[in-house]
Every structure is written in C-alpha cells, then in structure tokens.
C-alpha cells in the first residue's frame, strides 16, 4: 500500500494540472460579440488612402502636415481623401479640430485593405480626439 501512495499522488497531480491548463485555454477564448475588434493596422510600406468624413454638424479644420501647411476646412457632410505614400512620407499624421471649439470624436474603420476611414462626430469626453498617426510599422494610433 505504501508503494502505491506516491504513484497515486503523482497521477492526481498530473490529472489536476491538465484540468487547470484546459480551463485556462477555455477561459482565454472569446465567442462572437464578446471578442474585441482587432487593432487597425496596415502592412509596412503599403500605400494607404485616408478618407475623412465630417458628420459633426460643424466645420472641421484638418492639417495633414502640421508645420508649413494651411488647415483644410471640411464642411458638415463633406468627405476628403488623402493618399499616403510610405516611401516619401514616414509616420503620416492628421490633426483635426472644430472651428467652434466642439469636442470631436473620431471613429476609425478599415473598409478595405488599403483604406483608413475616419468619421468625425461631435461629442465625447473632453478633450476629445485630435490626432491620428499611421506609423512606419503600420500601426494606427488615435489621440
């Protein structure tokens, strides 16, 4: 009997260890709507179209390059498209703000493999969204 006790303890430990690992694997999965959306990103070096749609109800000013360019006004309901050329433009940035000091929220989506759609709406938490960066590694960041 005393010779079987260590074998029984080892078998129990192995069985419980496997059961715990299986529960972790099950808990790590998500199903359907409970899964968070994958982060937006593009292949590094890919040519990207950035489409900006103003649904805020007020005129929004955009600056594709902050230094040395004038802001571009976008009227309510208007859409603009920018083409990002990765070979000549590293780290594309787009800064936007309301002409009447409203808080803006940007909703980002990727309607196809080479387009980033930015829909600007009024509201959200102060200070709101103001800048979009497309980094050289393909990541899209919103501040």
Image (cartoon, rainbow, N blue to C red):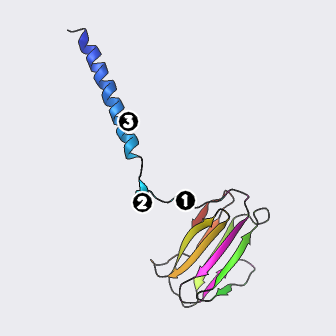
Judge by depth and name the residue closer to the eye, 77 or 2.
Answer: 77
Residue drawn at 46 percent across, 82 percent down: 123
Q: Earlier in the sequence, mark 1 or mark 3?
A: 3
Report whether 109 appears left or right of 81. Answer: left
Residue 63 among those drawn in magenta: yes
Mark 2 vs mark 1: in front = 2
Would you say 32 lies left or right of 72 here? left
Q: Does the segment drawn in magenta span residue 74?
A: no
Q: Residues within 10 Å of mark 1 (few under 14, many from 20)?
A: few
Measured from the top left, where is residue 54 in percent x and y?
Answer: 58, 83
Against 78, residue 4 (above or below) is above
Q: What residue does disc 2 label?
A: 33
Based on the displayed image, in which of its 4 quarters is residue 82 positioned? bottom right
**Which of the two discs, 2 and 1, labels the residue nearer the N terminus?**
2
Residues at marks 2 and 1, CA–CA distance in whole angstroms: 15 Å
The residue tagged 1 is: 39
Residue 85, x across and y down, in percent: 76, 66
User: Label 3 crowding class (10 Å Cα cut-off): few <14, some 14-19, many 20+?
Assistant: few
Write the start and end of the magenta stretch as one range: 43-68
Q: Quadrant of the N terminus?
A: top left
Front-lying residue, 132 or 81 = 81
Disc 3 marks which residue?
21
Query: Can residue 23 be spotted in the picture?
Result: yes
């Amino acid at each position: 009997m005393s010779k079987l006790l260590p074998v029984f303890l080892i078998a129990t430990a192995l069985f419980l260890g496997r059961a715990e690992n299986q529960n972790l694997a099950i808990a790590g999965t998500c199903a359907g709507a409970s899964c968070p959306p994958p982060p937006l990103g593009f292949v590094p070096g890919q040519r990207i179209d950035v489409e900006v749609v103003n649904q805020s109800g007020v005129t929004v000013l955009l600056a594709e390059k902050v230094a040395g360019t004038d802001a571009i006004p976008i009227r309510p309901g208007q859409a603009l498209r920018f083409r990002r050329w990765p070979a000549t433009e590293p780290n594309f940035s787009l800064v936007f703000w309301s002409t009447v000091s409203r808080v803006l929220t940007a909703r980002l989506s990727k309607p196809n493999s080479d387009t980033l759609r930015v829909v600007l709406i009024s509201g959200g938490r102060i200070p709101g969204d103001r800048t979009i960066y497309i980094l050289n590694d393909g990541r899209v960041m919103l501040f």
